[in-house]
Structure formats: C-alpha cells, structure tokens
Image (spheres, coloured by chain):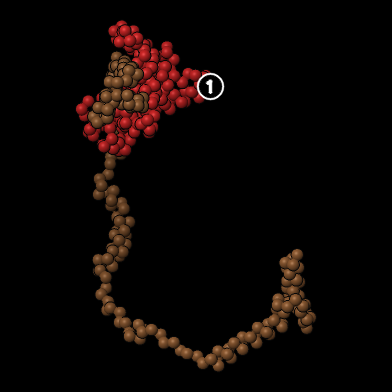
Amino acid sequence: MSRCPEKTEWVLYAAGEVPAGSRTALEAHLAACEACRSEVATLRSGLAEMEILDRDAPLRPEAVETLGRRLRAAAAHTPARKPLVLVLWHYRWAAAAAVLVAAALAWPLIQGPTPTAPPVISPQATAPAKIQWVPDTEVQEEITEIAAGVEMLEGGYGGTLCEAEPAPPRAGGDESLDEMDRMIEMLQAEGDA
Amino acid sequence: MTGRTSEPEDPEALLVSFAPRVYGLLLRLVGRPDVAEDLMQETMLRAYRSFDTYRPEGKFRAWIFRIAVNLARDWIRRRRHEPSTSLETEEPPLDAAPATHVPPDARMDRGERARRVEQALARLPVADRQILLMRYYGELAFKDIARATGEPLGTVLARAHRALAKLGNLIPEDES
C-alpha cells in the first residue's frame, strides 16, 4: 500500500475538488486503505450534514424593504461618474507636457543614427614606436646624480636610518626632527628587545 | 443563480437577491438575528459603495461573502473586548443558536438532526466555522475561499478538515 495522502487532500477529494488526474491515484489508494476510506466517509458525512440547513435564511420582509430603501438612498448620494473624456480633460496640461517630453526623448530614435565618416587611421599611428637609444655616459651621469642626492639625504636627515651610530647634532636644532629621531630610537629599541 | 457568477449588471437588484444567503451565513456566524440583520445591511451597503473595486474576473459571491465575514469577525472581536463579556464567549451561546430564531412553523419541520448540526456549528471556532459557511452559503471552492480570506489553501483545508470531522461524527454510523 502506498503512503497515505495528507488529510487536507481528502477534504478536496470529498468535496469533489480534486483534478481528474489526482483523483485516479487517490481512488487507487482508497481501494487498499481502510483508514483513509473511513476518513473520507467522515468528511462526506460532515458535508452532507450541512445540506440540512436552509441556504436562504428566512429574512424578515421589513429587512428586505429596508435594504432596498438604503441602497436607493446610497445610489442617490453617489455622484454620477464623469465620462472618461471629462476626466482626461482635467489633466490636459499634464498630458500635453508628457507628450512633448516623450517626443523630445524619442526624436533621436526616430531620426536614427547620424551617418559619420569612418575614422582614418594614419600609418604612423599603427606603426610601432621606435626605441631611442641613450648613450651609456648619460645613464652613468644620472646614476651619479641620484647617488649624490641619496648621500646628501643620509647625511642630513636619515643618517640614523642606515648607521648604528647616532647622527651628529644638527645645527639649528629643529624640534620636529628631534622628535622624529626619538621615535626612531624608540622603535629600534623595541625591535632589539 | 446563473447571473451571480457573471459580471453584475444591476448592483441594487443583485445585492438584494443575495441578501437571504448573506443573512444566513451571518446568522450562523454571529448567532444573533438582530446582529446578523444589521451586518447584512452593512455588507450590502459596503458592497454597493465599493462596487467599482469589484473585479469581474473574480467571483462576485466570494467578494460579497468576504465583506460579510470580515464584518462578522469585527463584530465578534469587538464583543470579546466588551467588559461584560468574557473571552470564553467568543462563540455564540447555544441558546442563541439560529434554530431558536427560525419561525415557529418552520422550526416544527426541523428534525433533531438539523438542530444538532446547528449546535455543532455554533460550537466550532469562528475561523473554522466561516470556512464551512462560506463553502455552503457561497458555494465557493476551497481555493476561492482561500483567496477571499487571504489564508493559505493548506490552512483553509486544515480548518475544513477539523470542522467537517466534528460534523461528520455527529450522527452515529447506524443512523447515517
């Protein structure tokens, strides 16, 4: 026997709201399952019990009369609907503005792409750049200049960066540079520790 | 009833034709004929005023019964908060069950079975009861009830299962 379907599925089955495809499978299960047969019988019995009640409850004639009167009164107080043209006329300026904006936005699309001449590619542009060889002497001179600059920096500011010995005291005693030196010493001390 | 499923032509006539059914549902939901009558009138007026919001692709019955059920639930909720009413009295008392308000001649024709069904319905939780009543009075499929109440179909079916099982066990097997 296959696994029993959910109870809620039997509600749909008992109420006749199961699609034909599912119904066949459910009926096959029912044929083999006593518990589900009992379940369906109870649900059908419950549905049948409801049928004993009157669908149209006896409503007092006065109540129906009152209802008709109230509905007519509501109809009298309900403003008549404006024709669609009048409703649209109320928004005529907004509609005109919207049309103008839409037309302006759509204009380039209507015109289509502007024909332009294909870009001319010059032979120079495509040719590989020529390498300019610099004489060795010039390179040597540049290296020398850079080395001199580094040496100057080391002597003036960064001596302690490269040398273990403390830098000579600077003339003028710039406080910010002294502060920097102290920080560097502190960091070095921490590194050593 | 054929015109009730299609787009309504004359709102006033259509609403009046639905009045007894809406009243029947409300009566068994709130258990008091005076309240049911007031709620029925209110349902119809609200439906009339918001007729523009009714969408023809939906079921008119589902739409109008949803208004009725919402009004009834609001009334029940308000009553629960009344100082003189305890929380246990959410369900209408059995003394106020609809059978007592049916005209005497009609009540004589009712059998013991009908009385028991009405009493059993009155004992059901409102949320479960409204599912059965919407199905019976509105002749709505469970999926339409789910759409009208805004509850998932599974919840609606679970409520229906619980309510139908109680009703189904009312009558002993040898009698049914």
Instruction: Please identify the quadrant where the N terminus of chain A is shown.
Output: top left
Reply above or below: A74 against A127: above
The residue at 28%/32% (across/down) is B59
Q: What residue type is labelled 1?
A: Pro
Q: Quadrant of residue B98?
A: top left
Residue B116 percent across, percent down from the top left: 36, 11
Q: What letter labels the chain drawn in brown?
A: A
Q: Quadrant of residue B54?
A: top left
Is A152 positioned to the left or the right of B109 in the image?
right
Q: Can residue A69 be seen in this view?
A: no
Q: Mark 1 lies on which chain?
A: B
Q: Can residue A84 be seen in this view?
A: yes
Residue designated by label 1: B83
Is B99 positioned to the left or the right of B81 in the image?
left
Instruction: Please identify the quadrant where the C terminus of chain A is shown.
Output: bottom right
Is A64 positioned to the left or the right of A168 in the image?
left
Regarding mark 1 in the picture, which secondary structure is present there? loop
Q: What letter labels the chain drawn in red?
A: B
The residue at 32%/56% (across/down) is A94
